[in-house]
Image (cartoon, rainbow, N blue to C red):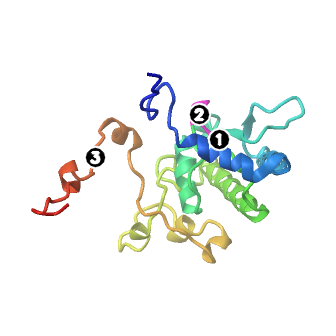
Amino acid sequence: AGAVGPVAAAPWGSASILPISWMYLKMMGDAGLRRATQVALLNANYMRKRLEGAYRVLFADRHGLCAHEFILDARPFGPTSGVEAIDIAKRLHDYGFHSPTMSFPVPNTLMVEPTESEPLAELDRFCDAMLRIREEIRDVEAGRAPRDRNLLTMAPHPVEALVADAWDRPYSREEAAYPVPSLRRRKFFPSVARVDDTFGDRHLICSCPPTSDYEEETVPGAH
């Protein structure tokens, strides 16, 4: 009587989430949580300010400020260049960044949430990448690059593609791999080229081994 039963599913959710949150709150304390919140707000608004001239920023308040995250609108680029949020997200891999949250809560947008943990150098590195990507979009808008085979729509560029004997793209290998000078000092190459995300979502293939592979062989006489 009075047993709760499993808590791994609804209505209680994952029990392991609560200790993580509790430990974070206890370790940070009142002063630490306040400071982390202040830094997260400062970081987000610093990046927003650097990018707002190149990108349309959604949901700012009447003072032009955001909270701990901000949303960059890629929808205006579609009619002018054919570039969408997915192309910017893929191109960011060439700059050494994991893609931000895409198309949430607004379709064809990027949600940037720097948090309180990133140093100024890393914030600037991301902003520099986004500003350079905006210049790449302008090249398409101005007709200096084609709409269908450009640095963004063909991104990302793994090593296998960059060192291949054949190179039939309308831009150089250097432009693909090193769009900013800092990448020559520190570069993380994406492991795969572009994949069809929609096709993959609709044709899920599980490559996990069958559960029988995890079964332990029973040794006679063993306890």
Viewer-proximal residue, 189 or 12?
Answer: 12
Q: Going by the picture, which residue comes out furthest to the top?
A: 1
Neighbor class of circle 3 (other Cα within 10 Å; few <14, some 14-19, many 20+) is few
- Expressed as whole percent of the image width and height from the top left, the position of residue 92 reads 58, 55
Span shown in magenta:
103-110
Counting from the top left corner in percent of width and height, residue 208 is at 27, 51
Mark 1 is surrounded, within 10 Å at the Cα level, by few (under 14), some (14 to 19) or many (20 or more) other residues, namely many
| Amino acid tagged 2 | Phe
The spot of residue 162 in percent (x, y) is 44, 70
Residue appearing at x 56%, y 50% in the figure: 99
Q: CA distance from mark 3 to mark 1?
A: 29 Å
Assess whether mark 1 and mark 3 are in contact (beta carbons under 8 angstroms): no
Image side of residue 145 versus residue 53, left or right: left
Kind of residue at badge 3? Cys
Residue underneath mark 2: 104
Apparent side of residue 85 relative to residue 38 in the rendered image (left or right): left
Instruction: Give the structural element (helix, strand or loop) at label 2.
Output: loop
Secondary element under disc 3, as helix, strand or loop, is: loop
Q: Residue at x 76, y 42 (%)?
A: 68
Residue 111 numbered mark, or none: 1
Q: Quadrant of the C terminus?
A: bottom left
Mark 2–mark 1 CB contact (< 8 Å): yes
As for residue 200 lying within the magenta part, the answer is no
